[in-house]
Image: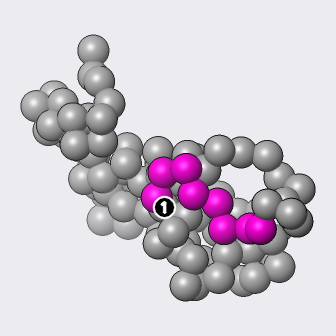
Amino acid sequence: MAREGRAEISVSGTGIGITETDHDKVLQPFTQVSNILDRFHKGCGLGLYLVKSIAEMHGGSISLESALEVSTAVTLVLPPGQPDVQTLRSGCRDYGLALY
C-alpha cells in the first residue's frame, strides 16, 4: 500500500503474539520475549531489530500491531526517493554496520 508516495509493506502471521509492553523490547538486538522453557520458535532476536535499523537508515519506520496468542503484524514504511550514500554510511556506523 502506498500513501503520499510512501511504500508500506505489512507482514502478519499467527503465533504467540507480542504484548504491547514488549513492543519496544523486540526491537532491541538479541531480544526475545517468550520464556526459554516454553519457546518453540528458533531465532536469535535480530530480525525486527535489523528491519527497524534499515528502515530508519532510509528515513522510514516500522510499527507493530499484535494480540497475545493470536497474531502479530509488522508494517514497514519507507518515504519516496532514495537516501544519499552519506546518510546510509552514517546510519550504518550508528548501528555498527559497514556499507561497501
Q: Name the residue rendered at 47%, 45% in the picture.
A: 50
Residue 98 x/y as whole percent:
29, 24
Q: Left or right: 22 with respect to 85?
A: right
Q: Overall secondary structure of the magenta stretch?
A: loop
| In this view, 64 is above or below 91 | below
Q: Left or right: 50 with respect to 33?
A: left
Residue 70 x/y as whole percent:
82, 79
> Which stretch is magenta?
28-35
Q: Residues within 10 Å of mark 1 (few under 14, many from 20)?
A: many
In the current view of this chain or complex, which residue is farthest to the top?
100
Q: In which quarter of the image is residue 73?
A: bottom right
Q: Name the residue rendered at 30%, 35% in the picture.
A: 96
Q: Left or right: 20 with respect to 80?
A: right
| In this view, 62 is above or below 41 | below
Q: Name the residue rendered at 55%, 84% in the picture.
A: 21
Residue 15 x/y as whole percent:
83, 67
Q: Does the magenta stretch include residue 97?
A: no
Quadrant in the picture for the C terminus: top left
| In this view, 29 is above or below 32 | above
Residue 77 x/y as whole percent:
40, 59
76 or 37: nearer the viewer:
37
In the current view of this chain or complex, which residue is farthest to the front?
37
Q: Left or right: 62 with respect to 83?
A: right
73 or 28: nearer the viewer:
28
Q: Mark 1 points at which residue?
A: 27
| In this view, 18 is above or below 61 | below
Can you see residue 10?
no
Residue type at mark 1? Leu
40 or 61: nearer the viewer:
40
Can you see residue 24?
yes
